[in-house]
Image (cartoon, coloured by chain):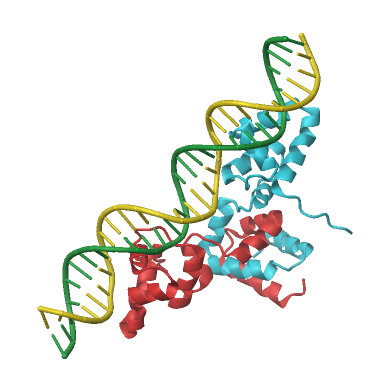
Chain colours: A cyan, B red, C yellow, D green
Amino acid sequence: MQRSAAPSFGTHVRALREARAVEDSRFSLRQVAARCGVTPAYLSRLERDESPPPGAEVLVKLAHELQEDPDVMLAMGGKISDDLRAAILARPRLFADLIRALRDTPEHAVLRILREVRDGDW
Amino acid sequence: MQRSAAPSFGTHVRALREARAVEDSRFSLRQVAARCGVTPAYLSRLERDESPPPGAEVLVKLAHELQEDPDVMLAMGGKISDDLRAAILARPRLFADLIRALRDTPEHAVLRILREVRDGDW
DNA sequence: GGGTGTGTATAGTATATACTCAACATGCAA
DNA sequence: TTGCATGTTGAGTATATACTATACACACCC
């Protein structure tokens, strides 16, 4: 199974937006920019990777506009959401060890842990 | 069991440094600053919380100097080490869910998970 | 009482981050 | 053929981050 290369932030956003623009004229660059509270000039540059990804606030608004998962959108912008940061910083040694241990653990194994935590007879 | 309030970054650093300075004159503010590659003026401000915590590089050098865990020192400076960030950003949805699930999980339970991951028949 | 060490105060700077404003070129629609 | 919408370009700005340089005041030692 071939894995496609991760698209850059701008490319990804443009793809999402243009996909929706086909059917809905409310997804022009200008209108999306307006709803996200930035200038069209800026969004244009973002989509062409001419500016580095925007701040967390704009990232989240973009995610909402484009129906992308906020954590994924933040990640594409190189950011981690504040609540996750806070959780890690509250117990840094614990989470540092855990994340390093799980870094190379396959998806399905992590999901299994997650399910068990949620079922929660810990 | 009474939990002492978390000390500010500067207070913590000053406490660590002065503890070692009692026995070892190489832990004067000036000498530690020099070994961490910053000016005494800056370290003085840091220790009195007059400047916000320094950048990651200085935080790690301070941790090394003062025998503190780097992840803990980074956390006190409000930062997360690059390798952890990278691990999370590589699989944002997975780690976001996991961290949120574990946010309120007691220490011993997380440690148990950690042990199991390390024993590793996942 | 001059030198050496300590921490501190004031002021300033370099770089990065996160954007804006104004103007422009193109297409299409009335 | 003008009017409006599209995306784009060039230049500039505000704020935050991460520090430095210089000078000062105090203590201790001989």
| Image position of B14 with respect to B105: above or below | below
Residue B36 position, x and y percent, is 44, 73
Judging depth in this view, the residue of C27 and B50 nearest the camera is: C27
Residue sitting at 65 percent across and 71 percent down?
Answer: B114
Residue A120 position, x and y percent, is 67, 60
Residue sitting at 49 percent across and 59 percent down?
Answer: B78
Q: Where on the picture, by quarter, is residue A47?
A: top right
Residue B88 position, x and y percent, is 66, 59
Residue B80 position, x and y percent, is 55, 62
Residue sitting at 77 percent across and 35 percent down?
Answer: A18
| Image position of B15 with respect to A120: above or below | below
Residue sitting at 41 percent across and 58 percent down?
Answer: B52
Placement of the N terminus of chain A among the 4 image quadrants: bottom right
Q: Where on the picture, by quarter, is residue B121?
A: bottom right
Q: Where on the picture, by quarter, is residue A67?
A: top right
Judging depth in this view, the residue of B58 and B2 nearest the camera is: B58
| Image position of B5 with respect to A12: above or below | below
Residue B89 lies left or right of residue D12; in this view the side is right
Residue A10 lies left or right of residue A91; in this view the side is right
Judging depth in this view, the residue of A49 and A19 nearest the camera is: A49
